[in-house]
Amino acid sequence: MTASLDPRAGESPPGAAVIARLRQAGCVFAEEEAALLLEAAAGQPNRLERLVAARAAGEPLEQLLGWVAFCGQRIAVGPGVFVPRVRTEHLAEQAVARLTGADVVVELCCGVAAVAAVLQATGRVQELYVVDIDPAAVGCARRNVVAPGIALVGDLYDPLPDRLRGRVDVLVANAPYVPSAAIALMPREAREHEPLVALDGGGDGVDVQRRIIAAAPEWLRPGGALLIETGRQQSVITAGEMLRAGLDVSVLPDDDREATVVVGSTPWPTT
């Protein structure tokens, strides 16, 4: 029997009933999730019931709340979009470290533009463009970046204005890097509620990365940096592709967050 979430209908407070429902559904952090769902429902029992039922059925918590915590910010997300992971904070932090002030920044495969939002919040970004092929994700991105930042729908570099060629200081991408054969092994939340285009990196996981890396030297200024989040196993391939593109490469792992960022910098011209 399902416990009622309306305090008028039973003896248990709604928080206890929500926790019990979430625990029964297998939510590991039932207490924390219950508190967030109660906040989101704002005292509306019917809304709370819908949220808890959806969460118990496996819908991602962040999509139900409408936001995800990322680098100390609440980043807007929505149904059916890729939810930024904690590991991607490593990508954001490495990108922030490369800002010098009045930078031109591009985020490709931006999803909801969580990384771009963190970069913009530093106050050191002068021009910002974020691009994703998924219109739903770009809709969220437009809520997360503020003017004069521009969010565009399209395939990688295609929608960018030509005047950015050779001017980009920081080019960042969390392109999909899960090998196609491994998609079936991902958590159910991702497989059923996030777009495949945001997950599937092709046979070896770096198909989209290859396309980003190959064109990056055309867009980066001398000394500019391309930062790509990738898997630990894919990092060797990612680094190799950057070397082939003529970039100076460093691989930056973060064991605590199980994150890996590969950075490729365009060399300064020799005199």
Image: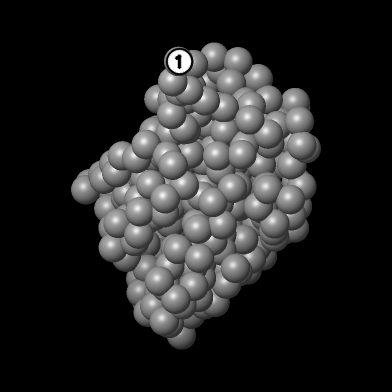
Question: Based on the displayed image, in which of its 4 quarters is residue 19 positioned?
Answer: bottom left
Element marked by disc 1: loop
Which quarter shows the C terminus? Answer: top left
- Residue 261, placed above or below residue 30: above
Front residue of 91/155: it is 155
Residue drawn 78% across the image and 37% down it: 161
Question: Based on the displayed image, in which of its 4 quarters is residue 197 positioned?
Answer: bottom right
**Image coords of residue 243 (percent x, y):** 38, 47
Q: Amino acid at mark 1?
A: Thr
**Image coords of residue 193 (percent x, y):** 57, 71
- Residue 256, placed above or below residue 5: above
Q: Is residue 259 visible?
A: yes
Front residue of 88/131: it is 131
Residue drawn 49% across the image and 16% down it: 100
Residue linked to disc 1: 271
**Residue farthest toward the front in the current orientation of the protein:** 271
Count of residue discs: 1
Q: Residues within 10 Å of mark 1 (few under 14, many from 20)?
A: few
In this image, 264 relative to 140: left or right?
left
- Residue 79, placed above or below residue 264: below
In this image, 174 relative to 110: left or right?
left
**Image coords of residue 36 (percent x, y):** 49, 51
Residue drawn 44% across the image and 76% down it: 203
**Image coords of residue 189 (percent x, y):** 48, 71
Q: Is residue 9 visible?
A: no
**Residue farthest toward the left in the current orientation of the protein:** 255
- Residue 73, placed above or below residue 76: above
